[in-house]
């Protein structure tokens, strides 16, 4: 997945809600953008500032994004390996338990027939 950092000239549809806590100075900055008519709401101002920060740090995101993709691949591989080990560890135990149940059934059957 490649992060799209540009193209914010047109306002993309915003389908995600992110909650965050801000200090008084940050809220005052949002309010300045609203009072100046640059943004309509605090939500809009915060989203705009986040986008501006992403665009201003595009080179950082470009450098980091390939590493993050690799980390995600490694995590997926680690999960797959852990699941394989879990199956290997559980399978003999389940087989032994199944064998014990079969033995117990055999014993109860032979005890009831004698």
Image: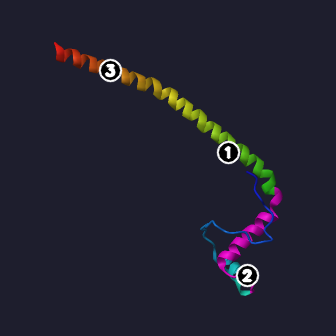
Place of residue 111 in the rendered image (x, y in percent of width and height, measured from the top left): 19, 16
Q: Earlier in the sequence, mark 1 or mark 3?
A: 1
- Which residue corresponds to mark 3? 102
Front position in the image: 45 or 104: 104
| Tally of marks | 3
Q: Quadrant of residue 41?
A: bottom right
Inter-mark Cα distance, 1 to 3: 44 Å
Q: Earlier in the sequence, mark 2 or mark 3?
A: 2
Q: Secondary structure at mark 1?
A: helix
Place of residue 84 in the rendered image (x, y in percent of width and height, measured from the top left): 56, 31
- Which residue corresponds to mark 2? 33
Q: Secondary structure at mark 2?
A: helix
Q: Secondary structure at mark 3?
A: helix
Place of residue 101 in the rendered image (x, y in percent of width and height, measured from the top left): 32, 23
Which residue lies at the image location 22% right of the left edge and 19% below the top edge? 108
Q: Earlier in the sequence, mark 1 or mark 2?
A: 2
Q: Nearer the viewer, mark 1 or mark 3?
A: 3
Which residue lies at the image location 63% right of the left edge and 72% below the top edge? 22
Q: Residue furthest right?
A: 59
- Which residue corresponds to mark 1? 72
């Amino acid at each position: 997945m490649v992060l799209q950092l540009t193209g914010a000239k047109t306002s993309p549809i915003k389908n995600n809600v992110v909650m965050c806590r801000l200090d008084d100075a940050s809220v005052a900055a949002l309010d300045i953008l609203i009072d100046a008519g640059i943004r309509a709401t605090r939500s809009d101002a915060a989203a705009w500032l986040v986008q501006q920060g992403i665009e201003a740090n595009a080179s950082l995101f470009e450098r980091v994004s390939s590493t993050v993709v690799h980390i995600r691949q490694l995590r997926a591989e680690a999960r797959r390996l852990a699941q394989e080990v879990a199956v290997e560890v559980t399978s003999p135990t389940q087989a032994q338990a199944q064998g014990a149940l079969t033995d117990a059934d055999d014993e109860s059957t032979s005890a009831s027939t004698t």
